[in-house]
């Protein structure tokens, strides 16, 4: 259409039909699962939507009532602490190390924050000008869960290079630690890093519980087979 071309004028019935068709296309675009129907007499748009299955980012809405405030507090703290920038060492020339690990300049470190759900389940968040360290203590109700947690965390930390932000050794008193630097935030989305930490905290309890059930079931079968000989 050239500039200055006069648009055609629609009467009331034509404009109503055009408006209905436009709204129908808009709804079909934003609601792919909606069934639209336009009446021919009054040009009234009627929609009947069908429920959309939850996506992978809706895991926060499926949390238990007790876990949700804990993870929300961790999420808010991580989002606030993940304001990192490139900062060279003030002690050694042409060195750029994570200050939260080196700890050579106290003025570059932030106050550590501990978010605790109970005595055995807590998160330590240590921030600095160019790095952030997150240490997680996983719930361990008995000796079996302690062994499973130790083995599972060791398995992951042996493959730390595949996780990029995972430390090979956790902070003392915690089960696993993550280290995020300004180079990670420059190459990755900050909110995706936060989502990964929260998702890991939510899924690790489920994984250990499933492994515990598997171990108990296998031990029961072994005991039954062993006692059949007597």
Image (spheres, rainbow, N blue to C red):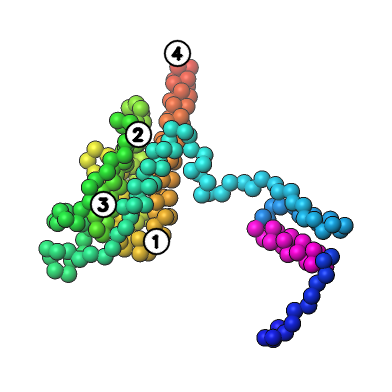
Q: Is residue 173 above or below residue 34?
A: above
Task: Name the element at disc 1.
Answer: loop
Q: Residues within 10 Å of mark 1 (few under 14, many from 20)?
A: few
* Residue found 48% across the figure and 43% down from its top: 60
Q: CA distance from mark 4 to mark 2?
A: 48 Å
Residues shaded magenta: 14-30
Q: What residue did someone put label 1 on?
A: 188
Quadrant the C terminus occupies: top left
Q: CA distance from mark 4 to mark 3?
A: 61 Å
Task: Name the element at disc 2.
Answer: loop
Task: Name the element at disc 3.
Answer: strand
Q: What residue did someone put label 3 on?
A: 127
Q: Residues within 10 Å of mark 4 (few under 14, many from 20)?
A: few
Magenta span includes 18: yes
In the image, which disc is placed on residue 29? none
* Residue 129 or residue 14, whichever sits in front: 14
Q: Earlier in the sequence, mark 4 or mark 2?
A: 2
Q: CA distance from mark 1 to mark 4?
A: 61 Å
Q: CA distance from mark 1 to mark 3?
A: 18 Å
Q: Residues within 10 Å of mark 2 (few under 14, many from 20)?
A: some
* Residue found 31% across the figure and 52% down from its top: 81
Q: What residue did someone put label 4 on?
A: 230
* Residue 165 or residue 66, whichever sits in front: 66
Q: Earlier in the sequence, mark 2 or mark 1?
A: 2
Q: What residue did someone put label 2 on?
A: 117
Judged by depth in the image, the label closer to the viewer, 2 or 1, is: 2
Labels 4 & 2 near each other (Cβ < 8 A): no
* Residue 118 or residue 230, whichever sits in front: 118
């Amino acid at each position: 259409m050239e500039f200055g071309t006069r648009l055609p004028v629609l009467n009331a019935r034509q404009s109503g039909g055009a408006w209905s068709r436009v709204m129908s296309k808009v709804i079909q675009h934003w609601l792919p699962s909606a069934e639209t129907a336009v009446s021919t007499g009054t040009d009234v748009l009627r929609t009947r939507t069908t429920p959309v299955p939850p996506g992978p980012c809706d895991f926060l809405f499926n949390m238990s009532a007790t876990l949700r405030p804990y993870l929300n507090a961790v999420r808010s703290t991580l989002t606030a602490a993940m304001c990192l920038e490139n900062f060279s060492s003030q002690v050694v020339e042409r060195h750029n190390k994570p200050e939260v690990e080196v700890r050579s300049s106290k003025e570059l470190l932030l106050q550590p924050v501990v978010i605790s759900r109970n005595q055995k389940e807590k998160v330590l968040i240590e921030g600095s000008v160019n790095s952030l360290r997150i240490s997680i203590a996983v719930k361990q109700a008995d000796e079996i869960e302690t062994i499973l947690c130790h083995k599972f965390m060791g398995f992951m930390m042996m493959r730390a290079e595949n996780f990029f932000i995972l430390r090979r050794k956790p902070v003392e008193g915690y089960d696993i630690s993550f280290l995020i630097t300004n180079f990670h935030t420059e190459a990755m989305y900050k909110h995706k890093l936060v989502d990964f930490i929260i998702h890991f905290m939510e899924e690790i309890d489920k994984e250990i519980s499933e492994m515990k059930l598997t171990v108990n079931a296998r031990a029961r079968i072994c005991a039954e087979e062993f006692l059949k000989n007597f």
